[in-house]
Image (spheres, rainbow, N blue to C red):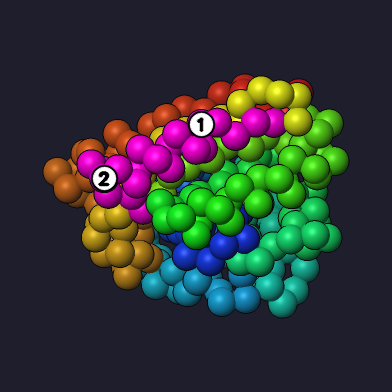
């Protein structure tokens, strides 16, 4: 069972958008997917409530008020972490995952919060012992803005406990297409190809990494 946690303690980083689109990506491949919502705001759960029944099935789990149990046949578990995940709460979430995806948006406040989160994250035992893999995503960026370049440079310079650089995958744009898809309970991969070509290209580095051995603990 593949377990991927989308996490950043800063609210507004786009965790739910990443989690729901990852769930759709794997569901479209015919995989048995569970979307586990740990956020009390229930945004991923609300998204699933809007999802048409005839679309690729995704099993929803409301883990913010009950234990997170997924069906035995599940192949991919995508977890949407709540904001303010720190300390023991963060450790409990990390224990559930093989892979962490950390979205960061381009603002000075969010970047500083991400750097503090990085410092806390690298002290987690599972990460130190290489039992979990981490990658960052520059999220909700304006493609040609200086803030995007600044954010990418900062994320590329983050380091793991072993001194190696923390992997940075890609940037994803601040685009209305994500809002239009979410309103219908869809992922962007389910929209008309003519409207999503560039967005799908931007997703490819992250998806390739997630599907590689580099994203799975030895």
- For residue 22, above or below residue 65: above
Q: Nearer the viewer, residue 133 or 68?
A: 133
User: Which residue is under mark 1?
Assistant: 156
Part of the protein shown in magenta: 140-160
Q: Is residue 204 left or right of residue 59?
A: left
Q: Residue at x 55, y 74 (%)?
A: 42
Q: Residue at x 34, y 46 (%)?
A: 147
Q: Is residue 10 left or right of residue 190?
A: right
Q: Residue at x 69, y 62 (%)?
A: 85
Residue lying furthest left in this view? Answer: 194
Residue 154 is inside the magenta segment: yes
Q: Residues within 10 Å of mark 1 (few under 14, many from 20)?
A: some
The location of residue 146, given as percent across then percent down, is 30, 43
Q: Nearer the viewer, residue 117 or 112?
A: 112
Q: Secondary structure at mark 1?
A: helix
The location of residue 34, given as percent across then percent down, is 59, 55
Q: Secondary structure at mark 2?
A: loop
Q: Is residue 92 left or right of residue 146?
A: right
Specify whether residue 65 is in view: yes
Q: Earlier in the sequence, mark 1 or mark 2?
A: 2
User: Which residue is under mark 2?
Assistant: 145
Residue 71's quadrant in the figure? Answer: bottom right
Looking at the rendered image, the quarter that the C terminus falls into is top right
Residue 65's quadrant in the figure? Answer: bottom right
Specify whether residue 189 is in view: no
The location of residue 45, given as percent across then percent down, is 53, 71
Looking at the rendered image, the quarter that the N terminus falls into is top right
The location of residue 113, given as percent across then percent down, is 58, 56
Residue 126 is inside the magenta segment: no
């Amino acid at each position: 069972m593949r377990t991927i946690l989308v996490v950043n303690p800063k609210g507004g980083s786009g965790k739910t958008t990443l989690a729901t689109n990852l769930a759709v990506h794997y569901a479209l491949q015919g995989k048995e997917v569970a979307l586990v919502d740990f956020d009390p705001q229930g945004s991923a759960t609300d998204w699933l409530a809007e999802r048409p029944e005839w679309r690729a099935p995704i099993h929803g789990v409301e883990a913010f008020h009950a234990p997170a149990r997924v069906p035995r046949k599940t192949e991919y578990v995508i977890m949407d972490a709540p904001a303010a995940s720190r300390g023991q709460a963060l450790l409990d979430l990390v224990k559930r995952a093989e892979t962490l995806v950390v979205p960061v948006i381009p603002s000075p406040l969010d970047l500083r919060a991400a750097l503090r989160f990085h410092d806390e994250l690298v002290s987690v035992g599972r990460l130190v012992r290489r039992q979990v893999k981490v990658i960052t995503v520059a999220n909700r960026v304006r493609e040609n803005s200086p803030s995007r370049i600044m954010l990418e440079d900062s994320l590329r310079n983050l380091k793991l406990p072993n001194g190696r650089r923390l992997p940075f995958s890609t940037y994803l744009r601040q685009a209305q297409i994500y809002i239009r898809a979410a309103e219908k309970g869809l992922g962007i991969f389910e929209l008309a190809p003519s409207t999503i070509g560039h967005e799908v290209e931007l997703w490819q580095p992250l998806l390739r990494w997630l599907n590689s051995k580099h994203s799975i603990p030895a």
